[in-house]
């Protein structure tokens, strides 16, 4: 039993067929719980007032925006090394989801920034690197759309994803050097364990983060299934025109 | 039921509205495309099996 | 290799090769900016490093899609791919030719155009040094972008979307060096970082370019 079994599209379709509803339902449950809890049943922060409620959208979407790119990077590497089609299609499927997460993080951040910092946008390192991430997602999706041969498209976008990751990382640290930030450091440092958010806010936030993660997985599974079917459809059409 | 959002009501409500709209947008788009491709594939497979 | 370089240079200099086009674009951009923001010398001097850097970036972008497109269309690229010369070397030579015909003229033109934009005298050497260090990276990264889009009909627009985000770190360090120079601070740190970045790009990007070319030719 190895995960490479799922590189076989038939196997992948069979397994994800029953996993998808599971992920979908649990994602809906977690996101709804986290957001409703956060919106209705948490107190206001003594400094930020009710705007603290935006955190239940802002932090999970920002988290998933980065994780989506990481997942695409891993999937691209698998495609380049082992040439499993499911992997390439999963990377393709994840990109628009990551893009939406990036947009949500940017927009909620801007709406939050206006009352807190007095401005919608500042050229702060974190904000700027998210904008750059957004541009990378756009370029990646545009390259997928532009190339007709699917395998070539998978190859080229994978290379772009690798190179883009290196440059995204470079940009992330380059902007630190360029401008000091308004954005606070992370409130939930996983590595050090000490967090600055009290439990009242943290529990619904954690639920919401899990929910966004599940939602991402569910969407990627669904979209990968669509891509596999679309690929099969293309093959069938090519076959039928070849027969005639 | 509705919590008192104070003077920041606009900011909180609009960020929730925008995010939910975008989330439902991508979910809807994915579901719609899945359904369409599934249907097209079923049709293509039907045609192929009829021919053989 | 030398023959390939010479051939590329000759093709670029002859009519239709696009040589000089980037330079003219750079000039026009620097003339247009004062109309856009007003003629105050102090303001112009402040934004001059940024304008010159962004101008150089865009001028560099103009000629990128020519790097491989013509060779791809007439089959030269297939010949190069099957020749004993490794494709990585071809990619490096192509990038070097692009730099000689686009990057180098931009570096030379930056000083007089800086005068036009009232660039502070203290910033001038650092701007030119930054451009000299940074434009090779622009050419190498741009060659990679050109290799990605070589088979496409409308690659020109896509290439800018793909390449411009990759130019970000170079632009940032270059403009920062010139700004620090203008303010009388030491610009060595950004210049060193940029030199490292350029060296890294020159070392690594030809492999990515060659990989992309192989995928496109298959």
Image (tube, rainbow, N blue to C red):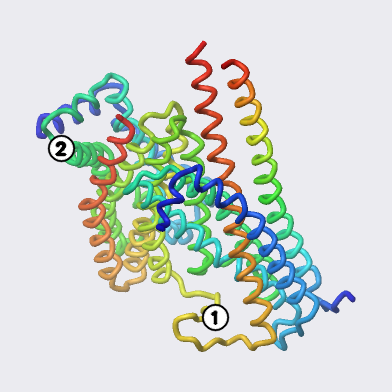
Chain to which mark 1 belongs: A
The answer to whether residue A235 of the structure is visible from this angle is yes
Q: Is residue C76 above or below residue A124?
A: above
The x, y position of residue A192, in whole percent, is 45, 86
- Which residue is farthest top? A244
Q: Is residue A42 above or below residue C156?
A: below
How many marks overall?
2
Q: State the residue in front, A60 or A215.
A: A215
Image disc number at residue A188: 1
Q: State the residue in front, A131 or A55.
A: A55
- Which residue is farthest right? B1
The x, y position of residue C114, in whole percent, is 34, 52
Chain to which mark 2 belongs: C
Q: Is residue A2 above or below residue B45?
A: below
Q: State the residue in front, C100 or A57.
A: A57
The answer to whether residue C53 of the structure is visible from this angle is no
Kindly report the distance in space between the C-alpha atoms of the residues bearing marks 2 and 1: 49 Å
Relative to B41, is C59 on the left or the right? left
- Residue occupying the point 15% across, 37% down: C86
The x, y position of residue A230, in whole percent, is 56, 35
Where is residue C188, by image quadrant? bottom left
Q: Are marks 2 and 1 in contact (CB under 8 Å)?
A: no
Image quadrant occupied by the N terminus of chain C: top left
Image disc number at residue C86: 2
- Residue occupying the point 36% across, 38% down: C148
Task: Please tell me whether mark 2 sits on a helix, a strand or a loop.
Answer: loop
The x, y position of residue A188, in whole percent, is 54, 80
Estimate how packed mark 2 is, as few (under 14), some (14 to 19) or many (20 or more) residues with alpha carbons within 10 Å: few
Q: Is residue C64 above or below residue C193?
A: above
Relative to A153, is B52 on the left or the right? right
- Residue occupying the point 34% across, 62% down: C173
């Amino acid at each position: 039993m190895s995960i490479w079994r799922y590189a076989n599209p038939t196997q992948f379709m069979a397994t994800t067929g029953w996993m998808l509803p599971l992920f979908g339902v649990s994602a809906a449950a977690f996101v709804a719980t986290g957001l409703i809890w956060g919106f209705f049943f948490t107190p206001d922060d003594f400094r930020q007032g009710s705007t603290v409620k935006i955190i239940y959208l802002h932090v999970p979407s920002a988290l998933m925006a980065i994780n989506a790119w990481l997942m695409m990077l891993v999937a691209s590497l698998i495609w380049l090394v082992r040439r499993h089609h499911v992997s390439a299609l999963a990377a393709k499927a994840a990109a628009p989801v990551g893009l939406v997460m990036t947009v949500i993080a940017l927009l909620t951040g801007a709406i939050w920034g206006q009352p807190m910092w007095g401005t919608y946008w500042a050229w702060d390192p974190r904000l700027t690197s998210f904008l750059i991430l957004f541009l990378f997602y756009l370029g990646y999706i545009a390259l997928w759309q532009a190339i007709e041969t699917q395998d070539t498209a998978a190859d080229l976008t994978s290379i772009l994803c690798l190179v883009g990751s290196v440059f995204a990382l470079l940009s992330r640290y380059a902007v630190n050097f360029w401008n000091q930030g308004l954005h606070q450091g992370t409130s939930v440092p996983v590595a050090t364990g000490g967090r600055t958010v009290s439990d009242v806010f943290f529990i619904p936030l954690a639920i919401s983060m899990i929910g966004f993660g599940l939602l991402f997985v569910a969407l990627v599974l669904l979209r990968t299934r669509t891509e596999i079917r679309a690929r099969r459809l293309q093959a069938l059409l090519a076959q039928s025109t070849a027969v005639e | 039921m509705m919590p008192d959002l104070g003077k920041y009501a606009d900011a909180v409500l609009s960020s929730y509205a925008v995010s939910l709209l975008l989330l439902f947008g991508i979910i809807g788009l994915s579901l719609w495309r899945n359904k369409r491709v599934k249907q097209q594939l079923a049709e293509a497979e039907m045609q192929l099996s009829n021919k053989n | 290799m030398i023959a390939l370089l010479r051939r590329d240079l000759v093709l670029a200099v002859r009519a239709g090769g696009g040589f000089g086009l980037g330079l003219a674009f750079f000039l026009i951009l620097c003339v247009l900016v004062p109309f856009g923001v007003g003629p105050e010398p102090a303001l112009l001097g402040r934004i001059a490093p940024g304008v010159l850097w962004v101008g150089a970036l865009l001028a560099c972008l103009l000629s990128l899609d020519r790097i491989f497109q013509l060779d791809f269309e007439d089959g030269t690229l297939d010949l190069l791919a099957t020749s004993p010369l490794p494709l990585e070397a071809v990619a490096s030579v192509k990038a070097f030719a692009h730099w000689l015909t686009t990057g180098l003229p931009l570096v030379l033109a930056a000083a007089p155009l800086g005068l036009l934009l009232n660039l502070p005298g203290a910033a001038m050497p650092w701007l030119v040094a930054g451009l000299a260090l940074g434009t090779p990276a622009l050419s190498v990264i741009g060659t990679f972008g050109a290799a990605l889009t070589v088979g496409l009909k409308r690659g020109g627009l896509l290439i800018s979307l793909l390449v411009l985000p990759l130019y970000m770190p170079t632009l940032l360090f270059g403009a920062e060096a010139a700004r620090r120079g203008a303010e009388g601070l030491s610009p060595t740190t950004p210049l060193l970082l940029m030199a490292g970045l350029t060296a890294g790009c020159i070392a690594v990007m030809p492999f990515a370019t060659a990989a992309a070319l192989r995928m496109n030719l298959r």
